[in-house]
Image: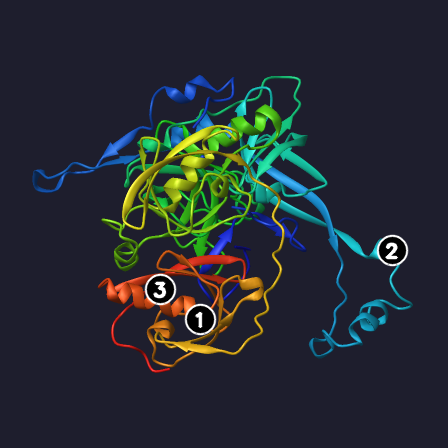
């Protein structure tokens, strides 16, 4: 994710509008609503004018948003943030990384005699949007709008400005909650139920595009359940209602004036609207807001696994009846999953009574359970279905893992892989991939570490070869290989046809 800027490539942009240097990093699962929502939002609907129905077919009603905008606009606000960022000297490209870089940073153009301490940082400003959900001054916006700002100000539609306190933020869903103090009740908008949205339904987006002030744009729900790589809880509403930089944190309304999404990102070649925008569904945002109001943080259950989706080939290799479920690609040491006996290669198909069709289903189901609680998992292990109970923990702070070394003579197995033992007998390191081999076709490369093959832990090339031969003798068409690359673990299905050249 990156902040909006001109670029020749189509990419995703979060929608905060920044002046100067970037201030905050963007981030990217149901609960009770905060008190004090404006009940008027539950009454009535936008007026519409009926378009002539062609030849007696389906009759289409074109919505009129005038009354809706008048009703909800007073609760949509501009959010302005101020912070500080490190000042950077204009270092010539040919000096970057050279011994002269620090000298030029201190004594180059614009820095005569060196920097003073107060010249090392300078103020930055950013703008986004938000909406009031409680008359006492509770405001919802995006986490990437407020970030680590030193000062946050909310401007009401009439121009009145109020200092805001950040109650809390959740980078994984990009939701944040602000609080302002007002001597009189503030106008509010109510939450709606995004689970009831249908593709093609009209929606209204409001916010502060490009810092211009309150603006309203209309469109439809283009799709639901979009995954855009923002995080493990991706489940975005896609809309063609025009939203632009500065709209971040603004509300997406249904025709009844209920907030059914929080505008967060756009897909664009230039940073401007091309009709592809994304909003966090209210079903997610509403529960996150309530958690943040309770104690300023979001508590999610933690299993301690990395996940990947299944495809038909992997499902066959793992003995799973169909390509549905969440494949455990790795289990973290001393995690709840490790304590509960889960293994890499297990495929989780249910959490309690909830069916798991893909990794997002498992991640969401686990996140909805409080740390310390137990969940029942149904899984497939080497073709057999079984159940286990796991007590979930809390997400720990992430730390970088140490690199590997692998000092030994290489050996080439029948899949076209040259291997050598990993450090401390942990995995087999790929030192060469034969051109034209199935391993190359599946994307393997030198430096990958093979941890498991066909359900067996491996530490040498002989372990890999033995597992492959056992799978061949069993008549399996392919074999599942767990590969570690950097900090990521994944499974690949390698076809077991003719032997590959060594």
**In this rendering, position of residue 171 left or right of residue 148:** left
**In this rendering, position of residue 139 left or right of residue 446:** right
Q: Which residue is mark 1?
A: 461
Circle 1/circle 3 CB separation < 8 Å:
no
Q: For residue 159, what is the image quadrant?
A: top right
Q: Is residue 3 in view from this perspective?
A: no
Q: Which residue is mark 2?
A: 117
Q: Quadrant of the C terminus?
A: bottom left
**Which x, y percent locates residue 452?**
42, 59
**Which x, y percent locates residue 415?**
35, 74
115 vs 212, nearest the viewer: 115
**Which x, y percent locates residue 351?**
36, 35
Circle 2/circle 1 CB separation < 8 Å:
no
426 vs 253, nearest the viewer: 426
Q: By what rule are the colours in the image chosen?
A: rainbow
73 vs 229, nearest the viewer: 229
Is residue 436 shown above or below 382? Answer: below
């Amino acid at each position: 994710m990156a902040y909006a800027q001109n670029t020749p490539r189509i990419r995703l942009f979060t929608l905060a509008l920044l002046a100067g240097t970037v201030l905050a990093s963007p981030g990217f699962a149901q609960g009770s609503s905060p008190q004090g929502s404006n009940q008027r939002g539950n009454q009535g609907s936008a007026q519409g004018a009926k378009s002539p129905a062609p030849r007696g077919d389906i009759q289409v009603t074109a919505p009129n948003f005038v009354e809706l905008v008048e009703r909800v606009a007073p609760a949509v606000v501009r959010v302005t943030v101020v912070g500080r960022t490190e000042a950077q000297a204009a270092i010539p490209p040919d000096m970057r990384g050279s011994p002269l870089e620090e000298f030029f940073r201190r004594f180059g153009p614009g820095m005569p005699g060196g920097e003073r301490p107060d010249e090392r940082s300078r103020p930055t400003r950013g703008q986004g949007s938000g909406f009031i959900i409680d008359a006492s001054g509770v405001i919802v916006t995006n986490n990437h709008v407020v970030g680590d700002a030193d000062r946050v100000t909310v401007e009401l539609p009439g121009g009145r400005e109020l200092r805001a306190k950040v109650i809390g933020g959740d980078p994984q869903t990009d939701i944040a909650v602000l609080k302002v103090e007002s001597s009189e009740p503030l106008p509010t908008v109510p939450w709606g139920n995004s689970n009831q949205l249908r593709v093609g339904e009209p929606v209204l987006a409001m916010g502060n595009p490009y810092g211009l002030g309150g603006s309203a744009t209309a469109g439809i729900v283009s799709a639901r359940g979009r995954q855009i790589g923002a995080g493990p809880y991706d489940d975005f509403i896609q809309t063609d209602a025009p939203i632009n930089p500065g709209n971040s944190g603004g509300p997406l309304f249904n025709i009844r004036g209920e907030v059914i999404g929080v505008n967060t990102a756009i897909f664009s070649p230039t940073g401007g609207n091309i009709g592809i925008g994304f909003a966090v569904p209210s079903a997610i945002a509403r529960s996150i807001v309530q958690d943040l109001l309770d104690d300023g943080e979001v508590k999610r259950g933690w299993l301690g696994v990395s996940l990947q989706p299944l495809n038909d080939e992997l499902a066959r290799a793992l003995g799973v009846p169909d390509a549905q479920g969440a494949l455990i690609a790795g289990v973290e040491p001393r995690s709840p999953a490790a304590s509960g006996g889960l293994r890499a290669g297990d495929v989780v198909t249910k959490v309690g009574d909830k069916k798991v069709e893909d990794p997002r289903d498992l991640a969401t189901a686990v996140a909805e359970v409080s740390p310390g609680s137990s969940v029942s998992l149904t899984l497939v292990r080497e073709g057999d279905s079984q159940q286990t109970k796991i007590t979930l923990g809390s997400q720990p702070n992430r730390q970088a893992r140490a690199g590997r070394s692998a000092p030994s003579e290489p050996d080439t197995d029948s899949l076209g892989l040259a291997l050598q033992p990993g450090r401390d007998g942990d995995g087999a390191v790929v030192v060469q991939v034969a051109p034209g081999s199935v391993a190359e076709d599946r994307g393997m490369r030198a430096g990958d570490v093979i941890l498991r093959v066909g359900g067996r832990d491996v530490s040498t090339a002989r372990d890999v070869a033995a597992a492959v031969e056992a799978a061949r003798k069993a008549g399996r068409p392919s074999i599942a290989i767990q590969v570690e690359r950097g900090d990521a673990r994944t499974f690949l299905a390698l076809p077991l046809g003719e032997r590959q050249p060594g």
